[in-house]
Image: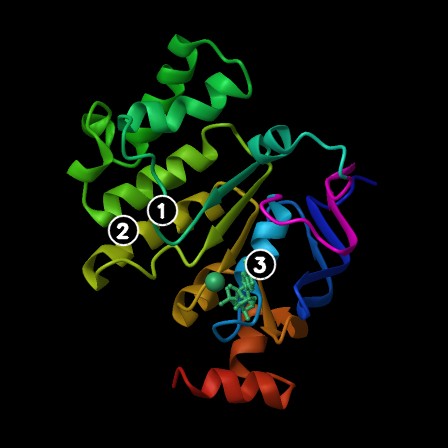
């Protein structure tokens, strides 16, 4: 049996005396799209940051396929080349052009020759309608265009897993849709995605599964339609009531 793309096993994370993740178990199968929902401070970003090794966990294990990436000996850059990540904001390196943003990890970490990496990058940029912006600096692009470039950069290394952390939160409302459309396309292509989101309608449309975090623990998880429409737990219901 092939292992799931991602498996968290009893993951705990503390900042000082505060336990921010209190024993999280989560399995993400190939092609699965999982939405993490929960109030601000519930631990969504910390969870994603632990998966891409921006934070070290205090207990438990995180497996990427058959690699125990919580083993302190793993090479963080190599793991990150297997996991594309897009954050809420400040994504792109401002001092280098769009094309260099997109090719950086392929060239530096995967040692792909520049010409090859650029050809792939241009193809991906073209798919999102931004090939014409390849030679621009990020600040010449709209927020929505920058986030689409950030997504392209995240998938340029052909990662096994894509992590998206509230990627539309910093965008003007009219720019949100172009970013969400791109995520929907990636899902349709079979990309495995874990995304923290406040966009409940989007979670319902795109996610296969929804995971509700509260106080650093998973309170409830289930198929998106079921969990969002008929949550079993009071805490989930109280959280979702805010979005009605
Ligand atoms: P969410 O993304 O769901 O809003 P976070 O993962 O950002 O939640 O935060 C969870 C908790 O961890 C919050 O109480 C936050 O203040 C705390 N926290 C996050 N990062 C740090 C840090 N680097 N140092 C100390 N506390 C942190
Ligand atoms: Mg967050």
Q: In terms of secondary structure, where does tag 1 sit?
A: helix
Residue under numbered circle 1: 182
Q: Magenta segment: does it hold 68?
A: yes
Measuring 68% from the left and 63% from the top, which residue is drawn there?
A: 14
Label 2 near ligand 2 (CB < 8 Å):
no
Give x and y (percent) for residue 225.
53, 73
Above or below for 125 versus 15:
above
Measuring 65% from the left and 45% from the top, which residue is drawn there?
A: 30
Residue furthest to the front in view is 16
Question: Start and end of the magenta stretch?
Answer: 53-71
Tell me if 138 is positioned left or right of 224 in this view.
left
Image quadrant containing the C terminus: bottom left
Give x and y (percent) for residue 180.
35, 54
Which is nearer the eye, 235 or 78?
78
Residues at circles 1 and 2 in contact by the CB criterion of under 8 Å: yes
Residue under numbered circle 3: 46
Viewer-side label of 3, 2? 3
Tell me if 74 is positioned left or right of 133 in this view.
right
Image quadrant containing the N terminus: top right
């Amino acid at each position: 049996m092939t292992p799931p793309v991602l498996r968290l096993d009893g993951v705990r994370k503390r900042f000082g005396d505060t336990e921010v993740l209190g024993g999280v178990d989560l399995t993400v199968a190939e092609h699965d799209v999982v939405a993490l929902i929960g109030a601000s401070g519930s631990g969504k970003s910390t969870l994603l940051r632990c998966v891409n090794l921006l934070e070290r966990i205090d207990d438990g294990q995180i497996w990427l396929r058959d690699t125990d990436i919580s083993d302190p000996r793993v090479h963080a850059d190599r793991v990150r080349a297997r996991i594309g990540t897009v954050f809420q904001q400040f994504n792109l390196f401002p001092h280098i052009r769009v094309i260099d943003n997109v090719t950086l990890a392929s060239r530096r970490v995967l040692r792909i020759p520049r010409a090859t990496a650029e050809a792939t990058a241009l193809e991906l940029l073209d798919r999102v309608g931004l090939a014409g912006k390849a030679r621009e600096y990020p600040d010449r692009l709209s927020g929505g265009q920058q986030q689409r470039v950030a997504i392209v950069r995240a998938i340029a290394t052909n990662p096994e897993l894509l992590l998206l952390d509230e990627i539309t939160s910093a965008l003007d409302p009219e720019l949100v849709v172009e970013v969400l459309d791109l995520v929907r396309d990636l899902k349709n292509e079979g990309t495995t995605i874990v995304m923290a989101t406040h966009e409940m309608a989007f979670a319902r449309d795109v996610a296969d599964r929804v995971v509700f975090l509260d106080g650093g623990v998973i309170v409830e998880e289930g198929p998106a339609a079921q969990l969002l429409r008929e949550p079993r737990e009071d805490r989930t219901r109280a959280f979702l009531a805010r979005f009605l």
